[in-house]
Amino acid sequence: MELMDIILKRRSIRKYTGEDIPEETLHQILRAGLLAPTSRNLRPWEFYAVRDKETLRRLSAAKTAGGGMLAQCSAAIAVFGDSEKADTWVEDCSIAMSFMMLMAEEKGVGSCWVQIHFRTDASGKAAEENVREILAVPSRFRIAGILSLGIPAEEAKAHTLSDADWGKVHRI
Ligand SMILES: Cc1cc2nc3c(=O)[nH]c(=O)nc-3n(C[C@H](O)[C@H](O)[C@H](O)COP(=O)(O)O)c2cc1C
């Protein structure tokens, strides 16, 4: 598939069939993230690839809303940045997540970014803290987001070239 076709076809998918995505496919998605560019080539990320159903269920409850699909997905990749290694961890990790979303699309896997940073659970506790506890992640690792992955059980209309808002481009 042409890269532009993948970009247009990629939509956030939140419903999954329950079928497992093959280990080789998960490997290819992770590898795409590991090959993303980073400032000073520091690669400050740490990817936590989760398949365990109980852990996925606990992650789905880490924040009040918008993470429910984690309980149904086949796998999730929680992306952390080592804040002591690079002050660009947010940028570096976000690019890696984007690469992984595009690779997932290319492999027929639905994905959705789950925002954790700045979100809380019902008691007001930081969702990031919950995720760090669930996955036993050191405190210097900061969360960029979680990618939920699964075989799509919903169809989302592809973007079209006309969705590109050229008013956002300022030529000087
Ligand atoms: C930084 C970021 C955070 C997001 N957080 C969530 C989330 O917590 N839950 C969710 O269901 N979707 C989340 N999304 C998905 C967006 O809602 C989605 O990308 C947007 O509506 C555009 O739709 P599309 O991805 O299908 O093109 C997030 C996307 C981004 C880029």
Image (spheres, helix red, strand yellow):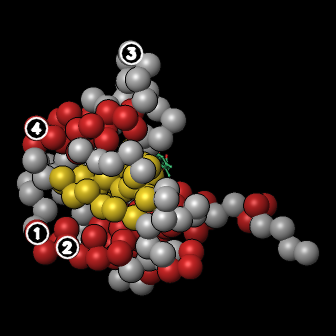
Q: Quadrant of residue 129?
A: top left
How far is disc 1 from disc 2 in space, using C-alphas? 6 Å
How far is disc 3 from disc 4 in space, using C-alphas? 21 Å
Is the C-beta of the residue carrying label 3 under 8 Å from the nearest atom of ligand 1? Answer: no
| Image quadrant where one finds the C terminus | bottom right
Using the image, tell me which numbered label, if any, was put on residue 27.
2
Q: Earlier in the sequence, mark 3 or mark 4?
A: 4
User: Of the residues shown, which amino acid type is indicated by label 4?
Assistant: Glu
Q: Earlier in the sequence, mark 2 or mark 3?
A: 2
Q: Is 62 on the left or on the right of 83, as rendered? A: left
Tag 4, which secondary structure? helix
Is the C-beta of the residue carrying label 1 under 8 Å from the nearest atom of ligand 1? Answer: no
Using the image, tell me which numbered label, if any, was put on residue 123.
3
Which residue is the site of mark 1?
23
Tell me if residue 130 can be seen.
yes
Mark 3 touches mark 4? (CB < 8 Å)? no
Tag 3, which secondary structure? loop
Q: Residue 13: give x, y in percent of width and height.
A: 33, 50
Which residue is the site of mark 4?
54
Which residue occupies 43% across, 59% down? 82
Mark 4 touches mark 2? (CB < 8 Å)? no
Using the image, tell me which numbered label, if any, was put on residue 117.
none
| Nearest the eye: 33 or 48 | 48
Which residue occupies 18% across, 42% down? 56
